[in-house]
Amino acid sequence: MSEERTYRPEWAPKEQTADFATSYVKGKEDTTLRSQETKKWVKRKERSVNEYVEGVLNNDRTILAQAITLVESNAAKHMEMAQQILHELLPHVGRSIRIGITGVPGAGKSTFIEAFGQFLCEQGHRVAVLAVDPSSSITGGSILGDKTRMENLARDPRAFIRPSPSGGTLGGVHRKTRETMLLCEAAGYDIILIETVGVGQSEFVVRSMVDFFMMIALTGAGDELQGMKKGIMELVDAVVINKADGDNKPKAEAAREEYNQFLHYLRPATPGWETKAYTCSALLGEGIEKVWNVVEAFIFVTKQSGAFDARRRHQLKDWIYSMIKDYLESSFFSHPQIKAELPMIENHVIAGTLSVTKAVQQLLQIYETKKESE
């Protein structure tokens, strides 16, 4: 072995011993890793509007997920492309049944949705689940664990689950949920399930975007009276008492009777439809078919009376006004002059030298004056 191919490492001991190797043979330098390190990063080619449209219509789940990401993005470039995609897809939307599902935490909404979704898939339907996860008001983070909680449904090729962070919006319902719903409809999903986080005002937002609205309830949790306080009973088309199994089944039946008693005295959420309570066990799959029969009966009755189409038209009108409010709010707080003046005006209000009403009037005057001069 030649000396040219061997050398003494720097870490070798000064005194060479028989049982310690102080040199090794140089081999051919491996440049694979170095070439990978120096290889330039190739940016993925951006899809065109037509590619997104064709992908969604062909139910390409990857492209559908990417299109939803565009819809959820607040970047101006993404928002513009998302609106172009939605415009092209408009002739293919509006043919699904939209179902909103709410309930207090722990009522078993995710378990019910998985059982309900699997039943619908077995009946030949294609189901999209838009599960809104609550975002932290402090960090802005979300767990987005609905695919984990609905593991069996997530594996079904006839189902599509999209967990979305609420982004701190009203009640946890993302402001882009409506547009996400349209994308899923264009992809061929004929049943759209929208799960709310069940924290107060979110129910009012979901009611404004679905055809049928149900509440998942528990027995012995005190949510009956709480639901009455929040006025949710005047919004729902059905109350489903979950976990009606084992020793809890008699309690669930008693709760159903109690719900039906005070539902009888409330004005129904939908004209021509009587809201009632039902029991089920999502864990055992019992009562799921009955719930679907109720939804089918609701769709038939409301389409015959015209209430179904009237609600859809009213929802579109609400959507227009909601988008106007969102745009004005964004335009106001992003205006450079408002950004500059707002902290000082806030300090005056906090110090007690300026009333809140006067502060708002000053800010609006600044905004309107600057907008007129632009």
Image (cartoon, grey):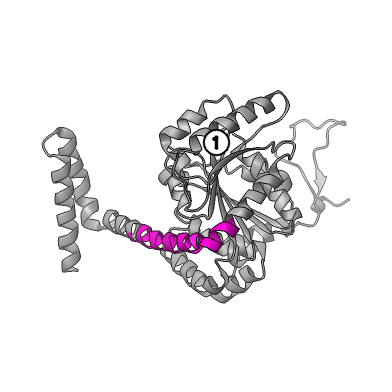
Which one is in front, 115 or 31?
A: 115
Q: Amino acid at mark 1?
A: Asn
**Element class at badge 1:** helix
Q: Position of residue 336 (x, y in %)?
A: 24, 57
Give the vertical position of 160 relative to 136 (above or below).
Answer: below
Q: Quadrant of residue 239?
A: top right
Give the dominant element type of the magenta stretch: helix, strand or loop. Answer: helix
> Could one spot residue 45 in this view of the protein?
yes
Q: Disc 1 marks which residue?
A: 260
Residue drawn at (69%, 44%) of the image: 288
Q: Is residue 309 magenta?
A: yes
Mark 1 Cα shell of 10 Å, populated few (<14), some (14-19), many (≥20): some
Q: Is residue 245 left or right of residue 191?
A: right
Report the span colored magenta.
299-324
Which one is in front, 271 or 14?
A: 271
Q: Is residue 274 magenta?
A: no
Quarter of the image for the C terminus: give it.
Answer: bottom left
